[in-house]
């Protein structure tokens, strides 16, 4: 009988799990759903710069203005009829660039942290001054598609152009060229890693499978996955009916505490998803302010942009899991 990872870890005590993890970091291979993950982590515990114990990284989505004029979805449950312009929903998205991002930028300045802003090309064209301000304040500009829509079903050359158009728009307006990618709802074609590498990207975030970054070799070169999150994402955690900011704040603290504890013996990373039109509201910024104050009260926390994480991983490959996977069309997971 095959012993799955779940059954194996259930059979271990905490001490056994710690011993297993230490052994894995010293060098081993494990099988994960048709993939092989090789770890060669040393015992130096150089998980993050300056001996940090936990990396915390925020993805700030710049989407307002990039959505379709009809059918984008939002707080109104009944869809608009016959593809007519959805005026209140578009105004809901506009809140992101009028209020949400400016408020968030002030919060990040207050706490002295930098984030990664995943930008839609059309949204950047709609609010170029705001995109420039994000870059001016030292945040990463990353790519989120030409428009706010799926591209995974496009022929490979069209998907590549969809991404390249976004990169060119962001570069033209901000002066910075994105090296990170996030697709609409994380959905890409099976060719995505090769396409991103061809376009000069260092990493993508479209895989919520781990609590640490890892490397996937693509055509003989390293490509980094900086995993995303659904459960710490405001778009999932803030349902429009029954919104409970207190519960979300506690979830953030619990996530932080658990990963911080684990970070004593292994590389750990906490991800937070922030959408301009959702977490940018006044009460939610107040809640995030409290959480950031809480997280900053602990020693050894690195608030990092995702390009910083990707570069650290590439520069410290010996401490980073390397994922060897079969074709995405077979494994169902991102691969070359």
Image: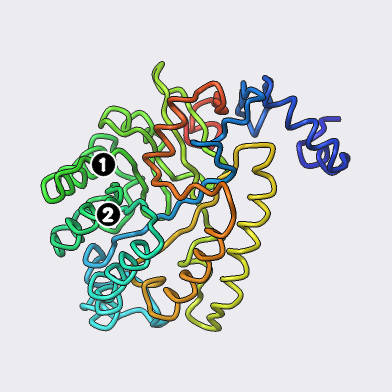
Which residue is painted at 20% across and 61% down in the image?
123
Q: Is residue 258 left or right of residue 73?
A: right
Q: Is residue 35 left or right of residue 89?
A: right
Residue 95 location, quadrant: bottom left
Are the residues tagged 2 and 1 within 8 Å (C-beta)? Answer: yes
Which residue is painted at 30% across and 57% down in the image?
149
- What separation in Å lies between label 2 and label 1 (alpha carbons)? 9 Å
Q: Is residue 335 above or below residue 306?
A: above
Q: Is residue 39 visible?
A: no
Q: Which residue is mark 2?
A: 119
Q: Is residue 90 visible?
A: yes
Look at the image and name its color scheme. rainbow
* 272, 30: nearer the viewer: 272
Give the quadrant of the C terminus: top left
SS of the residue under disc 2: strand
Give the quadrant of the N terminus: top right
SS of the residue under disc 1: loop
Pinpoint residue 28: horizontal percent, then vertical percent. 69, 20
Q: Is residue 251 above or below residue 51?
A: below
Q: Which residue is mark 1?
A: 178
N-terminal label among 2 and 1: 2
Q: Is disc 2 surrounded by few (<14), some (14 to 19) or many (20+) residues within 10 Å?
A: many
């Amino acid at each position: 009988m095959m012993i799955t990872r779940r059954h194996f870890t259930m059979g271990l005590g905490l001490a056994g799990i710690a011993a297993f993890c230490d052994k894995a970091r010293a060098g081993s291979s494990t099988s994960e759903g048709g993939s092989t993950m090789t770890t060669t982590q040393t015992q130096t515990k150089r998980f993050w710069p300056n001996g940090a114990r936990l990396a915390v990284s925020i993805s700030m989505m710049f989407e307002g203005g990039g959505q379709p004029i009809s059918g984008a979805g939002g707080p109104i449950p009944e869809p608009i009829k016959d593809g007519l312009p959805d005026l209140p929903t578009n105004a809901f998205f506009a809140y992101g660039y009028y209020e949400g991002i400016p408020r968030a930028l002030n919060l990040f300045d207050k706490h002295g942290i930098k984030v990664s802003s995943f930008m839609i090309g059309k949204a950047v064209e709609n609010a170029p001054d705001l995109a420039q301000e994000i870059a001016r304040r030292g945040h990463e500009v990353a790519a989120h598609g030409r428009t706010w829509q799926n591209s995974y079903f496009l022929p490979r050359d069209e998907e590549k152009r969809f991404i390249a158009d976004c990169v060119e728009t962001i570069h033209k307006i901000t002066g910075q060229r994105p090296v990170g990618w996030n697709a609409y709802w994380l959905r890409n074609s099976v060719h995505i890693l090769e396409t991103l590498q061809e376009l000069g990207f260092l990493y993508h975030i479209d895989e919520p499978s781990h609590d640490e970054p890892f490397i996937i070799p693509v055509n003989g070169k390293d490509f980094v996955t900086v995993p995303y999150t659904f459960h710490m994402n405001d778009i999932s955690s803030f349902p429009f009916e029954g919104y409970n900011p207190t519960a979300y704040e506690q979830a953030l603290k619990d996530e932080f505490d658990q990963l911080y504890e684990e970070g004593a013996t292994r590389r750990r990373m906490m991800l937070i998803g922030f959408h301009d039109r959702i977490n940018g509201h006044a009460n939610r910024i107040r809640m995030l302010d409290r959480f950031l104050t809480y997280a900053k009260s602990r020693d050894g926390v690195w608030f990092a942009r995702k390009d910083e994480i990707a570069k650290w991983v590439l520069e410290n490959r010996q401490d980073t899991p390397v994922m060897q996977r079969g074709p995405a069309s077979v494994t169902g997971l991102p691969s070359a």
